[in-house]
Structures are given as C-alpha cells and as structure tokens.
Image (spheres, rainbow, N blue to C red):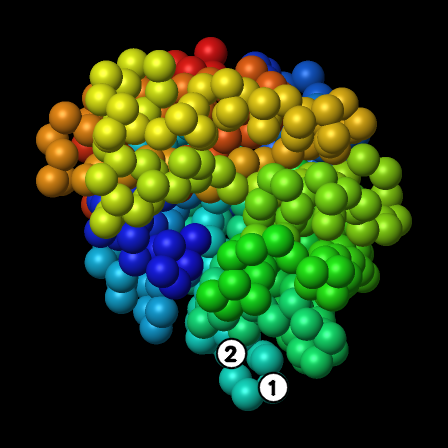
Amino acid sequence: MKTLLSTLLLTLGLAPVLSGCAASDASEGGHGAPAPGAQAGSTGMRELTGVQLSREMSPGLNLGNTLDAIPSETAWGNPPANQTVMNAFKAAGFKTVRIPVAWNQHADADGNISPVWMARVTQVVDYARNAGLYVLINTHWDGGWADHPTYDKQAEVNAKLTKFWTQIANNFKGYDDHLLFAGTNEVHVEKEYGRPTAENCAVQNSFNQTFVNAVRATGGNNARRHLVVQSYNTNHIAAMSCNAKLPTDTVAARLMMEVHYYDPSPFTIDQASKIWQWGRIATDPAASLKWGNEPDADAVFQQLKTAFVDRGVAVIVGEYGAGMKHAYPGMDRYRKYWNEYITGSAFRHGLVPVFWDTGGLFDRVTGAKKDDTVDLIVNSTR
C-alpha cells in the first residue's frame, strides 16, 4: 500500500486498507524453534512445501505504517513497535504478521543499510518471533524507487534489489522457516493502474528473479527459506498472466505468490465515493455496486487456487481490507461484513489472508483491541 492508496486508507481509518498447529515459541534470539512434530535439522528448517507451510499461517495482519514509515518509524502516526503489541496479535488468534519495511531511507548513497536500522528491524522481527508468530518482511514502497518496471530502469533497480536483499538475507540467515522474505510490494509504473505491457511484465519478473537469486546466494537457512514474489501491482489478473511463470529457483516448492485484494475499490478505499453498502445484505442500489460482490470474490480466489495452490504454490493475500467512511455511519455493518466475508473466502480457497492494518485494530502501545473486526477475521479462519 502506498502513495494515493495509502492516503485514502489513512483517511478511511483502515489500518494504511488452512488449519494447522500454530508457530511454536521462539528460542533465544528470536530465531524460532520447529513446530511440534515437524521434522527439522539443526537449522530448524523443516521439510515443508510452501503450501504445507501456508496452512499454519492464517490469519495474518500487517504492522502497517510503522517500519515502512518515512522518514522514521513514528512519522506516520504510530508509536514504536513493541513486544506487547506482538503478544496481543498472537493472543487474539493471529498466526502471521507482515512487517512492511523501508530500507532506502536508511541506506547511504552506495546502498549500505544503516547498522542501527538493521538492528531495529531485527528487534521488531524478534518481538514477533518471541510471540510465536510467523513473520513476513519485505521491501515496501520506500519512496517508490522500485516502481520502474521499464527497460531504461531495469538494471538500476535490479542492482539495488541485489544490494539490499544481500544485506537483509545475510542478517537473518540463521532464522528458521517461521521467517519469510517478500521481494517487493506493489511494483507498477507510478500513476499507471491499467494492464501491464509486455515490457512491464518482463522487467517486473526480472525483479522477482533478482530477489530470489540474491537471497539464495547468501546460503545458510536462506538456501531453503520460503520466498514470496509479487504479481504486477499485486493484481490477481496479472498473477495469472504476466507472472504465471515463477522465477527459477535452486530448491523446489519454496516460492509463494503474493496478491492484494481491495475490490470493489469505490467501497473499500475511495473516500470520495458514495458507495457505502456491499454484498447481498445491501439495501440501497444507489449506495452499492453490481460488481465486486461475494460471487466475484469467490471467483477470484478460486482462480488463484486453480492457478497456483493446486499446482503447489501457496498464495499470500498480503493486503486486503475495507475502511470506514464516517459520512455514512451505517457503513460500519457493511465494512465488517466485507472484512469477514473476504477473510473467510480467501481462507476457504486455501489462500493466506493478511489484513492491512495501520493501527485501527489494536492499540499499538497497550495491545488492547479497538475493533471487533479482529474477532471476525480470526473466527473466519477456524
């Protein structure tokens, strides 16, 4: 989530919108221990395919507008991440936390990441692992340096991806398979939201390949770590066309695909829209849409299941969510229904739903629940 979309979600108050055993408690240092009954070597890396691992990860949520904030962790209105809030996520029933991270803002002109920043990111990852959560870290918007899927910028972006991911992967190479890496975020040509061109697809696929190559080259547990690549602009249609062919990898069944879901956007994230009802419970045709409802969501997730999950590739719905338009108090019912239904549908189709939150669900200091959407999400994956 970034730029205009982030602004809309902030305005909306969206926190910037497979059953299995939970992750075990982390060992000292936050590296994590194998889940009970799993086969693992001394590295703690289990012999699990991406699909098998994904069955332990639902539901998830984002620690949004925190480590991805620019120019500092607290710049976008959230307090520093702490152990208490990670414990609260786990206690509420979440199994995964996605931690969007900005790196470029904390690197020198040669792409060397500040040791202070690397240590802070490590500390937050350890908070999550100490709580027993799966953790997903990425390179997020970060000022938009990767939003150039064009031939003229391809070499430059790939060089920076290699530089950053080599450092990040080396820092975390001893962590077990409860830590996953995601290469980028919503890569697209800035201000262009239409279908990608063949050039866009080819270049963005090269970004995915560069990420995989950089991580694998660091060795250690990264030789077998589960890695998440993104579809173009994390769009589900692009996932099944532009990005249907996954990067080449040196290990089998360890890649996952990430998409985001905010349909229909006039309801979920567009503050200016007068659409405030959704789905089969809508009562006002002027306040609702004829597209993007329950059957459409089910169809999207079924398509992703067929294209990826059924072929052995897990799918992470790395962001989704509907915010509140305060001009329409009655929207709260529909907002909660959308969040509940989309979570449940993604889960039923074998995908991992990871709700986009920037502080709307939990008090980021005390860990107290602020919205009963928490319970709707968690109960939708049981």
- Is 251 left or right of 80, judged from the image as shown? right
- Please state which amino acid type lies under the numbered disc 2: Ala
Q: Position of residue 257 (x, y in %)?
A: 67, 41
Nearest to the observer: residue 52 or residue 193: 193
- Is 230 left or right of 82, judged from the image as shown? right
**Above or below, comparing residue 237 to residue 219 in the picture:** above
**Above or below, comparing residue 211 to residue 15 in the picture:** below
Nearest to the observer: residue 19 or residue 275: 275
Q: Position of residue 339 (x, y in %)?
A: 36, 27
**Residue at 27% across, 24% down:** 285
**Above or below, comparing residue 139 to residue 50 in the picture:** below
- The residue furthest front is 286
- Residue 53 is labelled as none
- Cβ atoms at labels 2 and 1 below 8 Å apart: yes
Nearest to the observer: residue 91 or residue 1: 1
Q: Position of residue 64 (x, y in %)?
A: 37, 50
Q: CA distance from mark 2 to mark 1?
A: 8 Å
* Residue that carries the numbered disc 1 in the rendered image: 110
Crowding at label 1, few (<14), some or many (≥20) Cα neighbours within 10 Å?
few
Nearest to the observer: residue 344 or residue 194: 194
- Please state which amino acid type lies under the numbered disc 1: Asp
Crowding at label 2, few (<14), some or many (≥20) Cα neighbours within 10 Å?
some
Q: Position of residue 123 (x, y in %)?
A: 44, 55
**Residue at 36% across, 20% down:** 279
Res. 320 image quadrant: top left
**Residue at 47% across, 11% down:** 382
* Residue that carries the numbered disc 2 in the rendered image: 107
**Residue at 52% across, 63% down:** 192
Residue 234 appears in view: yes
